[in-house]
Structure formats: structure tokens, C-alpha cells
Image (cartoon, grey):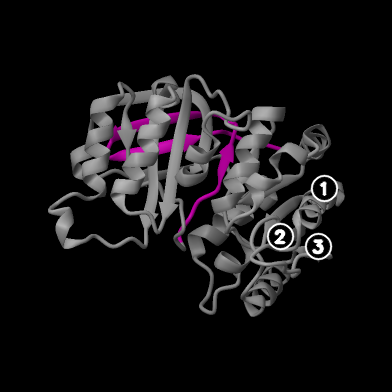
């Protein structure tokens, strides 16, 4: 059983029943769940003013919990980055606290890596993943339980036929990344990790492929992509192609990127704004292995 602390560092919770369902499901799994005092606060589009949300981060760090999970993403964390007490939060991570989230939480995760070298976890949000009206995705839940029990050591997925590798590809590097829009917004700031020789994973939602390409172009021209050993696409969802695209699609962007960088560009990682998502340690050393159509990210046991 894990002690799970639930907090809201970004947008206000709009679906409170989803939060209640998520808490009930985690408790049914045997976990102790603690809800931050301001988790359901709302001010404009945010979960409270900046001081309230900043306080929630620091309360999570001081909670003594095993896992700190966000209620939802949205927007708001980039406003807080200069005021986070990074050493204090990093000490909580060293004591075993695992921060878990995605989407806007990418800002916090990469800032923690850049400013304190701390490992956090890209993974589910309470409402979106555990609070669904239908049963939570089994793979997501199993990956979360692996994290809670300290059992998770990696993940794997199948590449498309066109991406099959001849022979064995093995790369080692620091895993980092998350939501592409947030990463692009952090370029040129102290909150984007240097990540030389890194393995970068990206995902996004509601972003047309031309906007995905534009954000990748920003990271390319900033020199970020040239420093990577591999770039791994997660799931890019909930966008609509238009007649005037005339064949321009996400695969067009992937093929364009492969012409811009020397590192391998892989697709299909089961992570993003989708029900089936794995958990990924942002900032951890990993091994990326590809053999045929089978891809694996392995990080071994992490306390």
C-alpha cells in the first residue's frame, strides 16, 4: 500500500466527480489517499492563485507520501517555475517521493531535472485516468501499480513495419521529455534540461501536424534535437486534418524530422493523452533497444 498525495498545480478541476471516482478507485486498490487542501480550489482558469498552487507543490513535497499525483493538467505551471524551492522538493524525491503527471506537468518535471537533477515520472493524472466513468485502462493501472510497488523496470512496444530495424540497435542515455508544446515553450530558459546524449520522448494533444512541425523546428534551431541519441514519438491525438493539407499529415512530419537529425526517430510509444499509457522516469538513465519491430525502454529497478 502506498500513501498517495493528490494536488492541483495547474488548471482548476472542472470534473469533481472524476476526482472522487479516482480517489475511490485508488483506495479500493489498497492505497492511502490524501487530498491537498486546495486541490479543488478555482480562480479564473487556475486551481487557485499562483501562491496557492505553489503551496500545493511544496505541501506535496512535505507530505511524506510515496507518490504525489496531479488531479489534471491544463495550464499554469510555467508561471510558477522561478518560485519553486527546488532543493527542498529534490530532497523529498531523494527520500522516495515519486511525482507523477503529464501534460502541463511537463514544465515541473523538466525544471526539476534542469535545476536539481531530480527524477520524476510521466504518467497518469487522477481525473483523466483513474476517474473515468468506464473502468481505468488495465495497462495504465498495471504500470502505476508497478511504480507503487517498486517493480517497474521498463516498457516495450511494437514499431510499424516501415520502422523495422535490421540487426540490433542499442542506445544508452538520459530519458527526458513529455508534452511537446511545453518543451518548446521552455526552450531558451533555465528550465529546459541540457540533456546531451539524451533520449527524448514527445507527445501532444489538439495540435495539428503543422504545429507539431513548427515546435520541433524551434527545438531543432535551438540545437536541442542535435544533442539527442534518439527521438521517440508518443501519441499525438485529437487533431483534425483539413482538405487543404493535401496529404500533409503527422507521418510527413516524422519523415521531415528524420532528414534533419542523425539520431533515430521512432514512433508508437504508448504514452500521451490516451487511456493506455505507460509510466516513464524523466531524468533516469535508460537503455533503448530495438530489434526488428520490437522496441524497449529499460531503466531497471528505481527506489
Quadrant of residue 299 within the rendered picture: top right
Q: Helix, strand, or loop for circle 1?
A: helix
Q: Residue at x 78, y 50 (%)?
A: 54
Distance between the Cα atoms at labels 3 and 1?
11 Å
- What residue occupies the far left of the structure in this picture? 246
Place of residue 106 in the rendered image (x, y in percent of width and height, measured from the top left): 58, 45
Q: Are marks 2 and 3 in contact (CB under 8 Å)?
A: yes
Q: Nearer the viewer, residue 278 or 246?
A: 246
Label whose residue precedes the other's in the sequence (2 or 3): 2
Place of residue 108 in the rendered image (x, y in percent of width and height, measured from the top left): 65, 43
| Residue to which mark 3 is pinned | 36
> Is residue 212 shown to the viewer in this render?
yes
Residue 63 falls left or right of residue 265: right
Q: Nearer the viewer, residue 168 or 111?
A: 111
| Residue to which mark 2 is pinned | 8
Mark 3: few, some, or many residues within 10 Å (few <14, many ≥20)?
some
Label whose residue precedes the other's in the sequence (3 or 1): 3
- Is 295 in the magenta? yes
Which contiguous range is marked in magenta?
276-303
Distance between the Cα atoms at labels 2 and 3?
8 Å
| Residue to which mark 1 is pinned | 58
Place of residue 53 in the rendered image (x, y in percent of width and height, measured from the top left): 76, 55
Amino acid at each position: 500500500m502506498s500513501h498517495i498525495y493528490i494536488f492541483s498545480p495547474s488548471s482548476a478541476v472542472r470534473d469533481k466527480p472524476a476526482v472522487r471516482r479516482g480517489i475511490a478507485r485508488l483506495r479500493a486498490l489498497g492505497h492511502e489517499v490524501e487530498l491537498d487542501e486546495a486541490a479543488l480550489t478555482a480562480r479564473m482558469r487556475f486551481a487557485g492563485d499562483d501562491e496557492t498552487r505553489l503551496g500545493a507543490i511544496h505541501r506535496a513535497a512535505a507530505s511524506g507520501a510515496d507518490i504525489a499525483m496531479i488531479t489534471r493538467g491544463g495550464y499554469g505551471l510555467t508561471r510558477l517555475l522561478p518560485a519553486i524551492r527546488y532543493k527542498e522538493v529534490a530532497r523529498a524525491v531523494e527520500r522516495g517521493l515519486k511525482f507523477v503527471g503529464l501534460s502541463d506537468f511537463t514544465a515541473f518535471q523538466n525544471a526539476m531535472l534542469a535545476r536539481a537533477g531530480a527524477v520524476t515520472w510521466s504518467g497518469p493524472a487522477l481525473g483523466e485516468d483513474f476517474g473515468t466513468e468506464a473502468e481505468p485502462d488495465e495497462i495504465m493501472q498495471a504500470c502505476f501499480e508497478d511504480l507503487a510497488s517498486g517493480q517497474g523496470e521498463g516498457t516495450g512496444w511494437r514499431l510499424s513495419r516501415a520502422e523495422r530495424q535490421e540487426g540490433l540497435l542499442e542506445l544508452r542515455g538520459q530519458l527526458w521529455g513529455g508534452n511537446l508544446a511545453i518543451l518548446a515553450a521552455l526552450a531558451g530558459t533555465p528550465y529546459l534540461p541540457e540533456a546531451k546524449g539524451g533520449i527524448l520522448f514527445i507527445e501532444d494533444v489538439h495540435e495539428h501536424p503543422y504545429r507539431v512541425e513548427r515546435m520541433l523546428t524551434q527545438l531543432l534551431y535551438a540545437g536541442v534535437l542535435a544533442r539527442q541519441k534518439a527521438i521517440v514519438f508518443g501519441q499525438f491525438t485529437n487533431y483534425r486534418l483539413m482538405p487543404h493539407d493535401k496529404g500533409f499529415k503527422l507521418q510527413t512530419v516524422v519523415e521531415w524530422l528524420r532528414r534533419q537529425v542523425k539520431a533515430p526517430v521512432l514512433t508508437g510509444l504508448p504514452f500521451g493523452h490516451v487511456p493506455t499509457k505507460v509510466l516513464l522516469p524523466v531524468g533516469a538513465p535508460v537503455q533503448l533497444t530495438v530489434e526488428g519491430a520490437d522496441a524497449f525502454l529499460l531503466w531497471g529497478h528505481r527506489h
